[in-house]
Image (cartoon, helix red, strand yellow):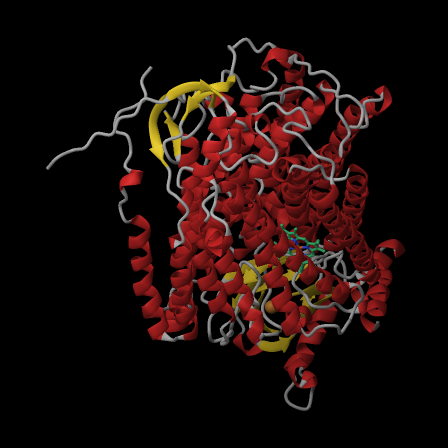
């Protein structure tokens, strides 16, 4: 409940439309509205593919209905009556298959091109990310380690909450401590797995400040359902302030301490 | 060394009562327990497959209902996480392995010799064996519930979670050993289908006259012969990792968790085509009967079937888009996964054209087939969406995929099977299913299914991951889940009605006669139910539709159904050549034999020994199995084959 209000408040503050804010608040894991470049590209693909899919289902559904409807009208509908005679005429029906084949192939070709070009556009961040976050999957929590370029003294660790600056790509390095997990924050990016013995990388970028919910997406044991995380995207100055706060020596609250 | 040549010139005669009586005596299964255990009649075995597979469907369905009650509302506490995990895992295993293929094997077993104009499968005892092993592996897997340790890692069972460090109980051992056992059954069955089609078709049934169901099952059987070894190996390595500390999948010992994923999906993706292509075949054969015309585009549909299977081996990485494999590889597999839609589209348009260019008779079977076409398309387009790699990064492992896979499996497998049941039940039992009750059950199943699973796409787009035992209120998934649960119960009532229909009609259904739907293929040329020998004289076919050819004037000559080869010197069938189906040899068929059953029992005991670490039992099973096999394969003069062919 708290989270919901926080999301709505932050989004409204930054001038997002009220409708968007409400959508994200009542469905924090909604996939069809990206708030960062990767999420947006994926959402656009799903919208487009859905439109094609629904049209195909409607067209084929209509054809099947029309075909069946004709006999309902002509009164051979019930089996109890006599069976209508057999007929042939393979030739005149074949064009259906050829036409279907051509339309399908062209549609798929277009979708394939769109897919590949989307893959290219989300493959690499638009610029070299200044910040790398290393996320380690554990049954059933996320360890998050912040690694700025260069300065070792500013490294620190949190759990289950990730803070990032708005408008900047952030590199995410994914490793696992036990079994396979999957990092997923629908508004920002699709899934990348955390696999023992392997280092995976992805990147995220948030366009707007906000709190984005994520959840483990690879079955990882009994509390898989509760392996959630939140990404707090703050304007760069607020992000810096938060970071400085994290580095304050004991007495200040580190996230890990406040959780335990 | 002397060579004995057996020669026999078969008679060609008309069908007669005296002949029928004689054949009945030769082919009949003996009464009593002995006959029950040792029968090799493909019709009995087929029905056993069907009944057993439906039983597993019911069990898997009950598991699903429990899950749906648990998920109907957020934060429900009906079952513990541990129980939920076992439920969804066993539901998946049951539906995919213990229902999905066996139900189709059942129909194929029952129908193959009938539509091929023969008297049994090529290897009747192997056929009995594959059924018994299937049953044994199902019981083996389900015995895990007795100890409360059913498999609990999803049907794809990824390590490391399936390794002892995280999963110390016997749960995964049940799965690993059970799957190796089931693989033996699948392989035996597949080999039998392939040889049966290659060598025991009716004289004159050249490749272009084979019903599509036969094409479907044969294609997937070849696929299985290639795919099953991969998964048996994968499970065997897993078992070694678990029992003997090898490190095939264990990253801490230098193994690779992803190796499992490759081996598993290399098998499991083809498998999803395996459990739909024969169903598509049944629809391709059944739909035309109710549209009163031949299937439009027979040749294209056959080619599409084969192409789908071949391409099915080249798309497995689309289950691994999120694993961080190289981008180049992923884009290739994304492309191939889109392309595999093309042959499916051919099949869809062939069915649509058949409906449009025919005169549909709206029976319950037709309703299931027509619904099948539309459901196929729904499952197909959502499949296309997940084939697009960037889209799949969102859709993967969400309820969108759960919706997709149920449209594919229920839409393509279950709807096809139920249509086939309405169509072939009269052949199997001699009685018609009730049409009125049939319609009620169809509409309840159709509406219930769509109410349950269409909104589930939306659940996925709202971001609900699969395999979660519950979810928080704030996630906003409550309403859609409630709708799904309501639909599920409507669906269940539809199924209940179907089973009532079956039981009532078995007693009181209208008598069917040999060909109640005026079907074109050979199974409709014999009585319902068929006699143990199927055909008194072996038919000679001259067209794709022997029973329609006079009316369709296909112009390829006339099939001969009443006059044909008489084989009545013991159990005999005719072997024909692989391509043109010219008569080639007379095959002596084995009598009822308990050894397949005994071998199964020995083997299963051996597997139980491995599971329980009772090594003496494993050793005993391992020793007795070959003894049983020797008894089975002991040469018998009655089975000596004719060396010379049937010429002229
Ligand atoms: C009676 C109707 C059915 C209902 C209500 C139903 C419901 C479900 C549910 C609730 C899940 C678990 C989702 C999760 O927790 O991730 C599931 C998974 C699954 N179902 Fe069904 N199901 C039905 C029929 C079928 C049929 C007929 C098949 C196959 C022929 C099937 C195949 C599967 C598979 C393969 C899974 C995935 C299991 C896994 O995640 O490991 N289901 N189903
Ligand atoms: Cu996890």
Which of A11/B568 is in front? B568
Residue that lies at the very extreme toward the right in this rendered image: A18
Classify the position of the N terminus of chain B by image quarter. Answer: top left
Residue that lies at the very extreme toward the bottom in this rendered image: A251
Which of B312/B539 is in front? B539
In which image quadrant can residue B63 be found?
bottom right
The residue at the point 56 percent across, 34 percent down is B530
For the question of whether residue B599 can be seen, the reply is yes
Judge from the rendering whether residue B453 lies leftward or rightward of residue B113; answer left or right. right
Look at the picture and state if B468 lies above or below A47. Answer: below
Task: Residue A175: give x, y in percent of width and height.
Answer: 52, 67
Judge from the rendering whether residue B534 lies leftward or rightward of residue B362; answer left or right. left
Task: Residue B185: give x, y in percent of width and height.
Answer: 44, 51
The residue at the point 66 percent across, 60 percent down is B466
In which image quadrant can residue B631 be found?
bottom left
The mark tally for this picture is: 0
Look at the picture and state if B177 lies above or below B405. Answer: below
For the question of whether residue B308 can be seen, the reply is no
Task: Residue B177: give x, y in percent of width and height.
Answer: 44, 63
Task: Residue B440: give x, y in percent of width and height.
Answer: 82, 43
The residue at the point 32 percent across, 69 percent down is B619
In which image quadrant can residue A129 be found?
bottom right
Classify the position of the C terminus of chain B by image quarter. Answer: top left
Q: Quadrant of ligand 2?
A: bottom right
Look at the picture and state if A136 lies above or below B548. Answer: below
Which of A192/A220 is in front? A220
């Amino acid at each position: 409940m708290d989270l919901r209000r926080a999301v709505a408040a932050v989004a409204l503050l930054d001038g997002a439309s009220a409708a968007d804010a409400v959508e994200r608040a009542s469905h924090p894991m909604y996939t069809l509205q990206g708030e960062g470049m990767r999420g947006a590209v994926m959402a656009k693909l799903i919208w487009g593919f859905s439109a094609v899919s629904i049209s195909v289902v409607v067209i084929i559904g209509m054809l099947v209905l029309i075909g069946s409807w004709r006999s309902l009208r002509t009164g051979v509908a019930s089996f109890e009556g006599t069976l209508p005679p057999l007929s042939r005429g393979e030739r005149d029906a074949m064009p259906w298959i050829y036409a279907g084949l051509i339309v399908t192939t062209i549609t798929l070709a277009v979708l394939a091109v769109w897919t590949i070009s989307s893959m290219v556009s989300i493959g690499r961040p638009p610029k070299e990310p200044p910040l790398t976050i290393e996320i380690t999957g554990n049954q059933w929590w996320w360890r998050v380690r912040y690694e700025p370029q260069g300065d070792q003294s500013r490294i620190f660790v949190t759990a289950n909450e990730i803070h990032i600056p708005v408008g900047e790509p952030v590199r995410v390095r994914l490793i696992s401590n036990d079994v396979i997990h999957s990092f997923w924050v629908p508004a920002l990016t699709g899934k990348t797995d955390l696999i023992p013995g392997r280092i995976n990388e992805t990147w995220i970028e948030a366009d707007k400040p906000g709190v984005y919910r994520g959840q483990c997406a690879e079955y990882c044991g009994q509390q898989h359902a509760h392996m959630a995380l939140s990404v707090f995207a703050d304007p760069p100055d607020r992000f810096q302030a938060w970071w400085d706060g994290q580095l304050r020596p004991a007495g200040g609250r580190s996230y890990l301490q406040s959780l335990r | 060394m002397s060579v004995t040549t057996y020669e026999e010139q078969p008679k060609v005669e008309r069908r007669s009562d005296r002949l029928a009586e004689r054949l009945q005596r030769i082919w009949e299964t003996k009464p009593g327990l002995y006959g029950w255990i040792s029968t090799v009649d493909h019709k009995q075995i087929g029905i056993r497959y069907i009944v057993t597979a439906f039983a597993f469907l019911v069990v898997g369905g009950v598991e699903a209902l429990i899950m749906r009650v648990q998920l109907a509302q957020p934060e429900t506490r009906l079952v513990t996480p541990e129980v939920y995990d076992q439920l969804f895992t066993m539901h998946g295993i049951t539906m995919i392995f213990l229902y999905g293929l066996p139900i189709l094997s059942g129909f194929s077993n029952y129908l193959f010799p009938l539509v091929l104009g023969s008297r049994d499968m090529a290897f009747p005892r192997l056929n009995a064996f594959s059924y018994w092993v299937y049953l044994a592996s199902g019981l083996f897997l389900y015995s895990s519930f007795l100890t409360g340790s059913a498999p609990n890692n999803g049907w794809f069972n990824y390590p490391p979670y399936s390794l002892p460090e995280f999963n110390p109980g016997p749960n995964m051992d049940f799965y690993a050993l059970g799957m190796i056992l089931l693989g033996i059954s699948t392989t035996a069955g597949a080999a039998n289908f392939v040889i049966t089609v290659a060598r025991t078709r009716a004289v004159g049934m050249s490749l272009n006259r084979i019903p599509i169901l036969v094409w479907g099952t044969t294609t997937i059987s070849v696929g299985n012969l290639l795919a099953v070894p991969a998964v048996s190996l994968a499970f065997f390595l897993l078992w070694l990792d678990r029992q003997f500390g090898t490190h095939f999948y264990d990253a801490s010992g230098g193994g690779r968790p992803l190796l499992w994923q490759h081996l598993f999906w290399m098998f499991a993706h083809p498998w999803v085509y395996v459990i739909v292509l024969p169903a598509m075949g049944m629809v391709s054969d059944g739909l035309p009967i109710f549209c009163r015309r031949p299937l439009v585009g027979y040749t294209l549909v056959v080619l599409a079937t084969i192409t789908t299977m071949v391409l099915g081996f080249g798309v497995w990485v689309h289950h691994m888009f999120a694993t961080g494999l190289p981008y180049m590889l992923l884009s290739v597999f994304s492309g191939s996964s889109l392309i595999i839609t093309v042959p499916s589209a051919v099949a869809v348009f062939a069915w649509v054209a058949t409906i449009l260019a025919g005169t549909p008779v709206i029976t319950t079977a037709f309703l299931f087939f027509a619904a099948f076409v539309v459901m196929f398309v729904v499952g197909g387009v959502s499949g296309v969406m997940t084939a697009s790699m960037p889209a799949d990064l969102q859709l993967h492992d969400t309820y969108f995929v759960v919706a997709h896979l149920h449209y594919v499996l229920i839409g393509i497998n279950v709807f096809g099977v139920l249509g086939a049941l309405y169509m072939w039940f009269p052949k199997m039992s001699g009685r018609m299913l009730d049409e009125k009750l049939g319609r009620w059950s169809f509409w309840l199943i159709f509406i219930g299914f769509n109410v349950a699973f269409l909104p589930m796409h939306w659940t996925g787009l709202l971001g609900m991951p699969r395999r979660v035992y519950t979810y928080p209120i704030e996630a906003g998934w409550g309403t859609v889940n409630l709708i799904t649960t309501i639909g599920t119960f409507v669906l269940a009532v539809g199924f209940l009605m179907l089973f009532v229909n079956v039981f009532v009609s078995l007693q009181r259904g209208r008598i069917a006669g040999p060909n109640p739907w005026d079907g074109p293929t050979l199974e409709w040329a014999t009585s319902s139910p068929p006699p143990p020998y199927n055909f008194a004289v072996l038919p000679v076919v001259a067209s794709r539709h022997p029973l329609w050819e006079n009316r369709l004037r296909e112009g390829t000559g006339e099939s001969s159904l009443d006059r044909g080869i008489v084989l009545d010197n013991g159990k005999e069938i005719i072997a024909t050549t692989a391509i043109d189906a010219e008569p080639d040899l007379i095959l002596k068929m084995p009598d009822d034999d308990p050894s397949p059953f005994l071998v199964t029992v020995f083997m299963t005991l051996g597997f139980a020994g491995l599971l329980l670490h009772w090594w003496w039992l494993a050793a005993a099973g391992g020793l007795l199995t070959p003894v049983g096999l020797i008894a089975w394969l002991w040469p018998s003069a009655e089975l000596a084959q004719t060396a010379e062919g049937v010429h002229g």
